[in-house]
Image (cartoon, grey):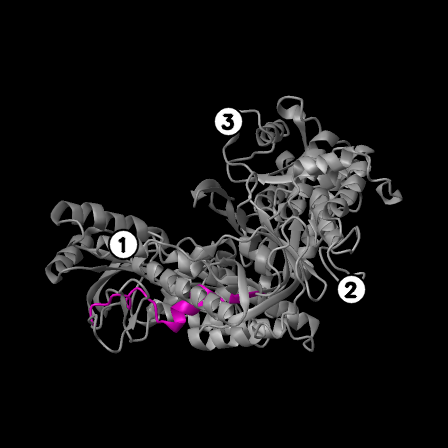
Amino acid sequence: MTVAVEFVDGDAVVWERPEDGGTAGTAGDASGGESTDCDALRTAVPRRDPEYEPAFLVAGPSRTRARLADWLTGDDRVRGVESVRRYRSLADREGERILRVRVAGPDAVRPVARRVRRGFERARHPPGALRLFDVDLDPTVRYCLDTGTPPVPAGGADALSTLRVDLPEDALAAGDAAPLRVDGEPAAARDAADGGEAVEAAAVEALGRALDRTDPDVLVVSSGDLLPLVAERADDLGVPFRWGRHDERGVRRLAGSNSYESYGRVGFSPARYAVPGRAVVDRAGSFLWAEAGLDGLCYLAERSRRPLQATARASIGGVLTSMQVYHARGRGVHAPWRPWTPERFKPVGTLHDADRGGVTLSPEVGVHRDVVEVDFASLYPAIIRAHNVSPETVRCDCCGDDDSGTTAVPGLGYRVCAREGFLPGVLARLLDDRAAAKRVADDDDAAPAERERAGRVADAIKWVLVSCFGYQGYRNAKFGRIECHEAINAFAREALLDAKDAFEAAGWRTVHAVVDSLWVTPADAGGSAGGSGDGGPATVDGPAATPARDVAARVSDAVGIPLEFEARYDWACFVPKRGSRAGALTKYFGRRADGTYRVRGIECRRRSTTDFVADAQRAMVRALGGDGDREHGGGGDRGDADADLADDPLGAVCRVLARRLRDLRTGGVDPADLTIRTRASKDPEGYDRDTLTAAALDRYERAGVDRAAGQSVAYVVVDDDARGAGRVRLAFEEPDGYDAAFYRERLIRAAASVTSPFGSDRDDVEAFLGDGRDARLSAF
């Protein structure tokens, strides 16, 4: 069973655990000698594959390929060339001869490919004469694809052991290993505050014992940088220690850290490290670990043929690309290097019609009763599957506009070929697996562990499905095409408008719609409650409206995509844009029929909002439903099943606000609950204004902690009127105070968001707090 794949001195090394749980017999070790005699029954051992030679492909005219083969004979990095038959693109129906260039190792692939491009093609042929494939694949992914090696054990997460190692960022910056934590517990016998190298040595020794005892397949670390730090401190302290399995090789650095920009947002990629025989998951640089855990990572690794460590550090687009590359290999198509698929000619009118996104209807600001929310399940992937949308099927070369076997794209005049598409084939298994996982996750009769595992797998698949649509319009997509992007949007617009028309014909009124979701209320419900909180009572399944589930079922049958009954709300509030009465598309909150609350878009859902303000805002929402100011949870059972909207919404919210302001004013709030977490948009020297983020970065620099654009910063505001680093304290500095006036502003802003659907603004909130009307004991 494969545990990890790596390259050592140009050779592939596969770490395997025997299927029967015994030792691996005579497998060669990573240094090329005889296998290690493993006494442990479950440990993995290395199998070196010195015969493996990675290759890339070159397509072009036969004479040009022949000249290139001769030209490459003088390059000592080239191990051989041969002619193979492959498909050049997804649209091809017949294969053609392509040159396969085998090289000495993975590090030679790009240099030789660049030499072909620059030294051969540019000097002798016009641009585009040659097409290169399989140049920029991750080496470990390439190995699994070429050799059929499974990237993870057949048992997935259940077959892997893990060890979690954490080190606070201030200790990491100071080069101090004493505060090490292993599986959540302090590694050192004494508290790290006692100081001294003895504590540090004890922590490293304890970590070494944990590694020997658990022999983990997966190391889950708070930061990859702690790996070389601990190894260095062990050497300095004279403590025997090794991260890897079976040999004395230390941590290898695979890549340095860097900042990048994607879709207008600045991100940060931390340095990457490899440990012999173990997969490393850097929690600071793994979005997928945070969202899907080990179960989700193993599922994606299996589907994409990416080893576990490569999957953990990959972006969602990277995982999707690997899935497409793996699926394309099955069709005899290889991944193009620097793909270039020009947009086909279209009339100006068609271009205008095609250059649109999904349907959005501005919500009716205010409070609405008896609201039903329905949404299409995985709309964009489902459209791709249901309508066979794929780069080679949309406006294909094999069908005419009048062919009966084709499908028309609504409003655009594009035709979609009937032959099985590539992209639907990639997504079909994901859609089916997610549906199955959700059934288990929602099954009350299933074992809790099974439900939790299925939920993580469903979450992992969700993110890949979310990205598949946008990836079609991405200029560097291996198998993308803008016409696919346009066609998917056109089908989505038609589906949502069909659903809207069906509900309105069945006695419902649409109060909001966004791309794949509808919010409707019975047409005789009296409309929005507006600022008064009034609204004519109506039952969702009353005589004036066809039951929503029945309408959704009819739409599902007509459109061919499941329209799911998401929730029924006793009441729902749609929030206006700040400084306007126009509705914000993604800001709403409400109480569902089961007594739980749903909140989207407002402050408590934002990463930068402090825990204290977020908890207070959730309590304000609950107070609207008569649930009081409970201290914990954003939902749950109602205190009174018959409770309706508060008669005085502004008062209900402001009474909660008054209590929280009192806690803030009297120093009764833990500063840790006031921590602001945000992302630096620039390097420290790039800020020319004294913002809070700039102040935090200045403080990080003084503490010796490096911070770059795209990295997170966490701080508490202690004096907003000060200048520079004095305005804040970093979270790891454990501040003992805060600027109450600063956080008062954040609380009032949060309260104004909750009261805004009722026609009350910030001034009304301030006036209520200041006019002495609230004399209830609960305010004190």
Expressed as whole percent of the image width and height from the top left, the position of residue 663 reads 81, 38
State which quarter of the image contains the C terminus.
top right
Asked where in the image residue 440 lies, by quadrant, the reply is bottom right
Q: Residues within 10 Å of mark 1 (few under 14, many from 20)?
A: few
Amino acid on which the number 2 mark rests in the picture: Asp
Would residue 50 be seen by someone viewing this image from the given angle? no
Q: Nearer the viewer, residue 656 or 712?
A: 656
- Alpha carbons under labels 3 and 1: distance apart: 43 Å
Is 96 drawn above or below residue 260 in the view shown? below
Contact between marks 3 and 1 (CB within 8 A): the answer is no
The amino acid on which the numbered mark 3 sits, given as a three-letter code, is Glu
Q: Nearer the viewer, residue 116 or 266?
A: 266
Q: Provide the residue designation for mark 3.
A: 685
Question: In the picture provided, is 676 more to the left or to the right than 681?
Answer: right
Under mark 1, the amino acid is Leu
- Which is more N-terminal, label 1 or label 2? 1
**Secondary structure state at the residue bearing disc 2:** loop
Q: CA distance from mark 2 to mark 3?
A: 57 Å
Give the foreground label among 3 and 1.
1
Which label was assigned to residue 50? none
Decide: is 435 above or below 124: below
Q: Can you name the residue that lies furthest to the left here? A: 63
User: What residue is rendered at 28% in x and 68% in y?
Assistant: 393
* Residue range highlighted in magenta: 373-399
- Secondary structure under tag 1 reads helix
Q: Are the residues at dot 2 and dot 3 in contact (C-beta closer than 8 Å)?
A: no
Q: Which residue is mark 2?
A: 642
